[in-house]
Amino acid sequence: MLIVCTKDPTIVDFTKSSESGSKQWGELVILTGNQTEATIQLIEALKRVNDPLCLSAHGSDTEIGDEGYGGKYWTWTAKQIAAHFLDATGSYGGPILIHACAKNVSNFSAHLAVALEEVGALNNVWIYGYNKAIGSDARYPDPAFLNLQVDLQFSKVGSSKTY
């Protein structure tokens, strides 16, 4: 499942295109509305998630979401996303890709792994993410080969280690 967590039309339109690589992720969910509505849609999508999962958005090392298109901001911290996983996913065991910009090794994907460990959710799940800027038209990598992507770092929930 690929969940687009931004209203940015560049990201939304590119994700819908055949060049994006989004089809290999299965179901495509594009969030809409205000922060509350988008959060409800995110939780509902997480309840249906099967292997693998990608969250696509604008991002930083501490949060993902929306840059404010239409004057409305969507943002979620790693702790908020972890809480939504705890509420929604039960025994999910597949990989998770955070397809968003970051700057450091201590980025959103690493923070999410720690936050999931703190709430006791998704033990042994691998979280992948970037520690650099990526373009709004950055192709989605093949979910079957995330561990071979040289531009991704990965963290394992429950191990407190980043690779």
Image (cartoon, rainbow, N blue to C red):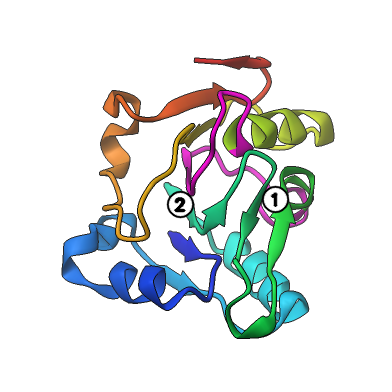
Q: Using the rendered view, name the quadrant where residue 104 is placed.
A: top right
Most foreground residue, 60 or 18: 60
Residue at the image position 68 percent from the left and 21 percent from the top: 158
Most foreground residue, 142 or 103: 103
The residue at which mark 2 appears reads as 54
Q: Residue 132: x and y, percent?
A: 45, 35
The secondary structure that dominates the magenta segment is loop
Residue 101 horizontal side relative to residue 88, left or right: left
Q: Amino acid at mark 1?
A: Phe
Look at the picture and state if 138 lies above or below 163.
Answer: below
Q: Using the rendered view, name the quadrant where residue 48 is placed.
A: bottom right
Give SS at disc 1: helix
The crowd level at tag 2 (other Cα within 10 Å; few <14, some 14-19, many 20+) is many
Q: Residue 80: x and y, percent?
A: 78, 52
Residue segment shown in magenta: 84-108
Give me the disc on residue 132.
none
**Residue 93 magenta-drawn?**
yes
Residue at the image position 53 percent from the left and 57 percent from the top: 58
Q: What separation in Å lies between label 1 and label 2 (alpha carbons)?
A: 13 Å
Residue furthest to the left in view is 19
Q: Residue 69: x and y, percent?
A: 58, 78
Give SS at disc 2: strand
Q: Residue 39: x and y, percent?
A: 71, 70
**Residue 101 magenta-drawn?**
yes
Q: Nearer the viewer, mark 1 or mark 2?
A: 2
Q: Quadrant of the N terminus?
A: bottom left
Residue at the image position 69 percent from the left and 79 percent from the top: 72
The residue at which mark 1 appears reads as 85
Instruction: Compare marks 1 and 2 and give the one earlier in the sequence.
Output: 2
